[in-house]
Image (spheres, rainbow, N blue to C red):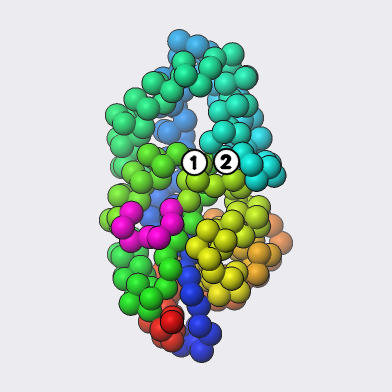
Amino acid sequence: MKTTNDKRYQALLVDLDGTLLDLDHENFLRAYIEALAGKFSAYLSTDNFIRHLFEAINVMLENHDPQKNNETVFYEEFCRRIGQSRRQIQPLVDDFYRHDFPKLNSWGSEHPYASRVIKKAKNKNLICVLATDPVFPAAATLQRLSWSGLSPADFQLITTMENMHFCKPNPAYYLEIAEAINCPPHQCLMAGNDTLEDLISSEAGMDTFLVEDLIFDRGNEEPTFTYRGKLQDLARFIDGLPESS
């Protein structure tokens, strides 16, 4: 892979789970869902909780209403399904993310090149966006970010369910980011390990970098990308870019 490029990017969008953060994705999700289900044991069984949770997530993933953020869409559907109001369940959710979610950090660890990628992007005056799928609240996203050894101060935008209106793999998610940072999509580079959710940013007009350390292959047709390589290759690639104006 070439480590120099004449194209002038204005922004680097980078995924978190499996990209900047080494994450045992399958075991993390299993432990996460089990722990969250335990908080709702007074309302419904674990099986029913999981069913309603995923149905509400699916409604959020399929939302196309730019007037409703992901948080609103999810809780409207989830609360309707379990027959409880948002006000009733919010203390349970807050307690979970305050006390239980941090205990899941054993499933994630720092990637040795994560901080280097962001440092080099900053050196090139690139706008840095943590483009993690906004199906989690900010509390969970910031926790996972801390497991990677990075800080919220490293990014001009961190996508969460509270501040986004679309999810991956909807190209509208990437267009919303471009609008939020006031950067044309063709001047954005999206880096991530998911062959569908990250590479679909090309349909929004962005260049893509497939990060190969922990590729999440969705089994879709042969993935297309602008560049590919390990996270350390992404660091070298950014180092070879001309400085953003």
Expressed as whole percent of the image width and height from the top left, the position of residue 37 reads: 46, 23
- Tell me what residue is drawn at x 35 percent, y 68 percent: 118
- Tell me what residue is drawn at x 56 percent, y 63 percent: 178
Q: Does 138 lie within the magenta span?
A: no
Q: Mark 2 points at which residue?
A: 69
Expressed as whole percent of the image width and height from the top left, the position of residue 90 reads: 43, 23
Q: Is residue 30 above or below residue 148?
A: above
- Tell me what residue is drawn at x 38 percent, y 76 percent: 125
Q: Is residue 158 above or below residue 77?
A: below
Which secondary structure lies at badge 1? loop
Which secondary structure lies at badge 2? loop
- Tell me what residue is drawn at x 50 percent, y 87 percent: 5
Q: Is residue 169 left or right of residue 227?
A: right
Cβ–Cβ below 8 Å for labels 1 and 2?
A: yes
The quadrant in which residue 68 appears is top right
31 and 190: which is toward the camera:
190
The quadrant in which residue 227 appears is bottom right
What's the residue type where badge 2 is placed? Asn
- Give the residues in magenta: 152-158
The quadrant in which residue 100 appears is top left
Q: Name the residue under label 1.
A: 162
107 and 168: which is toward the camera:
168
Residue 8 disc label: none
The residues bearing labels 1 and 2 have C-alpha atoms spaced at a distance of: 6 Å
Q: Is residue 207 above or below residue 164?
A: below
Evaluate whether residue 217 shows in this view: no
Q: Residues within 10 Å of mark 1 (few under 14, many from 20)?
A: some
- Number of marks: 2
33 and 176: which is toward the camera:
176
Q: Which residue of the protein is positioned furthest toward the top in this rendering?
A: 42
